[in-house]
Amino acid sequence: MGGTQHLGPSAHWRRKPRGRVAFSRGLSTKLRSNEPSEPVFHAGEAPSFAFSFDIDGVLLHGAKPIPGARESLKYLQDNNIPFILLTNGGGKPERDRVSDLSSRLGVELTVDNFVQSHTPFQELVGGPKGLGDKTVFVSGADVQKCRDIAHSYGFKCVVTAADILRDYPEIWPFEPLLESVYGAGARPLPRPLHTGDHMHDDTALKIDAMLVFSDPRDWALDIQIMVDLLLSRQGVLGTYSAKNGDRSLPNDGWQQDGQPLVVFSNADLFWSTTYHHPRFGQGAFQAALDGVWRKVTGGRELVRTSFGKPSAETYRFAERMLNEHRTKILGRGREMAPLRRVYMVGDNPESDIRGANEFASPQGTEWTSVLVRTGVWRPERGEPVHKPKMLVDDVKAAVQWALKREGH
Ligand code: G3P
Ligand code: MG
């Protein structure tokens, strides 16, 4: 694998009195003659490098910390080396996920150093094209939680499949989903559906954007409603655009009549859990929707936007948060040396490695990709399509390699 080095088993840490954490070399490397007793950074110094850690497959398998994860984060925190957690996971409010992660990983995390798949959706609220005052359809695993998150970001009018199904059960002709599944979270619709009975479009429910916060549990229902909206006139649910299939129009008239944006929060086909093979992620849901759309339109590609790793929007958002976090914990009101390098430690070549390799930082920070063997990528699945700068066993080895590379 060109340009990728391999590192063996990981390092071992010994804690010294508060603030002085010695970093002794691991079994795989010769002990250094001068056993480093000095701390890597004294309080107040600002290292010119930082870390960005993926979560699933690097720090956790499901709810279980991966060996070495806790010590690695603790070591960095004790030595004032900034890091953020950058995950394509989502579906819970940032504050709830952060408190859960803090207790699982034994370090104090805050929303300042935590970016999940939909966190950048906050940037869709304001501005001239902002959606804050528009009506958005939200999809996700726990869609009531996703509605709450959307409200907390500033989206004022949020509609879910449960709301639609409750008032119009015929929209999904199979036996209506159990009251327990949808009933509890359903809310009254802001407007009735267009039922075709000479209703005026402007009296019916119009959706301006579809936001997928996390993988919906009922792909079929969400795909039905999302395709209904993609075929509609101006996002008015229950209508059908006369432009659809019109070959005199661009894209044969598909998605040419003010239909709502489709915005996904990540494109992960697989992700790493406690099961011994990677599981389908939101990228699989996207592929299902793509496949249905291609069937419906005679082969047209679905026009959509995807946030999350590897998108540049997400890496830009993460870099900005990392810089703000670094200033907050180390700046102490003084000018700091710029952040020169970020080590992106991930398990998925398609998201973590590709994103870091392709990201062109607006401030010239170098993102160095480090692939671990504890997640989605497995050697038996062939060479990673996106080559990491370094291939290591686990997160501990990743931190060891990076610190050594930074001369510590
Ligand atoms: O849904 C979680 C999955 O997409 C991957 O999360 O932490 O590996 O980016 P992560
Ligand atoms: Mg991962």
Image (cartoon, rainbow, N blue to C red):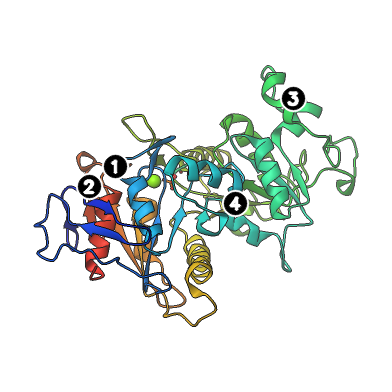
- Counting from the top left corner in percent of width and height, residue 297 is at 57, 43
Q: Is mark 1 within 8 Å of ligand 2?
A: no
Location of the N terminus by quadrant is: bottom left
- Counting from the top left corner in percent of width and height, residue 119 is at 58, 54
Q: Residues within 10 Å of mark 1 (few under 14, many from 20)?
A: many
* Residue 185 can be seen in this image: yes
Q: CA distance from mark 1 to mark 2?
A: 7 Å
Q: Residues within 10 Å of mark 4 (few under 14, many from 20)?
A: some
The answer to whether 378 appears left or right of 274 in the picture is left
Residue 388, placed above or below residue 57: below
Residue that mark 1 sits on: 374
Q: Secondary structure at mark 1?
A: loop
Residue 149, placed above or below residue 180: below
For the residue marked with disc 1, what is the amino acid? Answer: Thr
User: Residue, x 55% and y 50% (percent of image)?
Assistant: 265
Kindly identify which numbered label has been placed on residue 263.
Answer: 4
For the residue marked with disc 3, what is the amino acid? Answer: Gly
- Counting from the top left corner in percent of width and height, residue 219 is at 57, 32
Q: Nearer the viewer, mark 3 or mark 1?
A: 1
Kindly identify which numbered label has been placed on residue 183.
Answer: 3
Sequence-earlier tag: 2 or 3? 3
